[in-house]
Image (cartoon, helix red, strand yellow):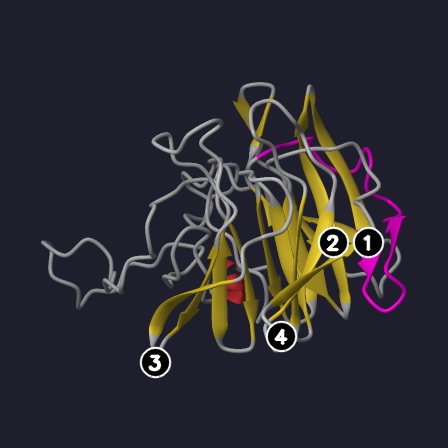
Amino acid sequence: MRASDLTIPVLGLFMPVFFSLFACHPTNIPDTQLGNWIAKASIGDPPRGGAASFVIGTDAYVGLGYNQSIGNTGRLRDLWQFSIDSGWRQVADFPGAPRSNAAAFSVGSYGYVGTGYDLVNVYSDFYQYDPATNGWTKKADFPGTPRYDAVGFSVQGRGYIGTGFNVNWMNDFYEYDPVQDKWSLTPGTSGNFSKRQGAVAFVYKDRAYIVTGVNSGGMVRDFWRFDPSQTPAWYQLANITNTDEGTFDDGLEREYGCLYLGL
């Protein structure tokens, strides 16, 4: 697979910004310009890290997260909607406990948020957000070990949450059926790829991809494609370290990168 096959717009985990996952080097950018970032309106107070995000239609939703100036654990439960035309507006608060480092995805016209932690508790509860009613509904709990720093994505009408950390690093994945409100362990995951937390997941042409993250203090380098219509569903792609004569894989190892949730 060529690096250019996966050059797509990516939605930032903390702010809606767009860039290519694999670096490009256009010759028409001045030497003094670092990239092609365009400033947009800031999210409402307070600023935060470790937020969760999902996309419904053309609108992005960012919420929860951590700000050390907040009382108690510093965790948040507010949710903000971003529109390209009108900017940010606050919508209904997340109904679960305040938390950061949760996983999220959208399926159809609904957003979903679950897992996460607050320095004391690690969570497995799971909720659906409906923008039509600006309301939340509790759904079946995530069935795996409670965790944080997991990834979430949706593909082919189902949602997925996997990897993450709770005492140990994990590489299991679970599939969520929004019609039946049921979870099931995704076949072929455990043992396939490196355990990790703080990874990136994105979706391109009805296939999901997982890459980057950290395991036991070291950066992971394996890169995987997921297609639930295929057997096996997981397929390993080229490593993201400099193990190839090409330049597309140079310096991509990292944790807590940006996240894309659909295309």
Badge 4 or badge 3: first in the primary sequence: 3
Q: In front here: 90 or 197?
A: 90
Q: Tag 2, which secondary structure?
A: strand
* Percent position of residue 49, x then y: 41, 40
Q: Nearer the viewer, mark 1 or mark 3?
A: 3
Tell me the amino acid under the disc marked 4.
Thr
Is residue 87 shown to the viewer in this render? yes
Q: Rounded to the nearest whole Å, what is the CA distance between mark 2 and mark 3?
A: 30 Å
Badge 2 or badge 1: first in the primary sequence: 2
* Percent position of residue 42, x then y: 28, 58
Q: Rounded to the nearest whole Å, what is the CA distance between mark 2 and mark 4?
A: 24 Å
Q: Is residue 86 above or below residue 233?
A: below
Tell me the amino acid under the disc marked 2.
Tyr
Q: Nearer the viewer, mark 4 or mark 3?
A: 4
Badge 2 or badge 4: first in the primary sequence: 4
Tell me the amino acid under the disc marked 3.
Asp
Query: Label 3 belongs to which residue?
Result: 85
Badge 1 or badge 4: first in the primary sequence: 4
Characterize the local packing of mark 3: few (<14), some (14-19) or many (20 or more) Cα atoms within 10 angstroms.
Answer: few
Q: Rounded to the nearest whole Å, what is the CA distance between mark 2 and mark 1?
A: 5 Å
Q: Tag 1, which secondary structure?
A: strand
Identify the image quadrant of the C terminus: bottom right
228 inside magenta stretch = no
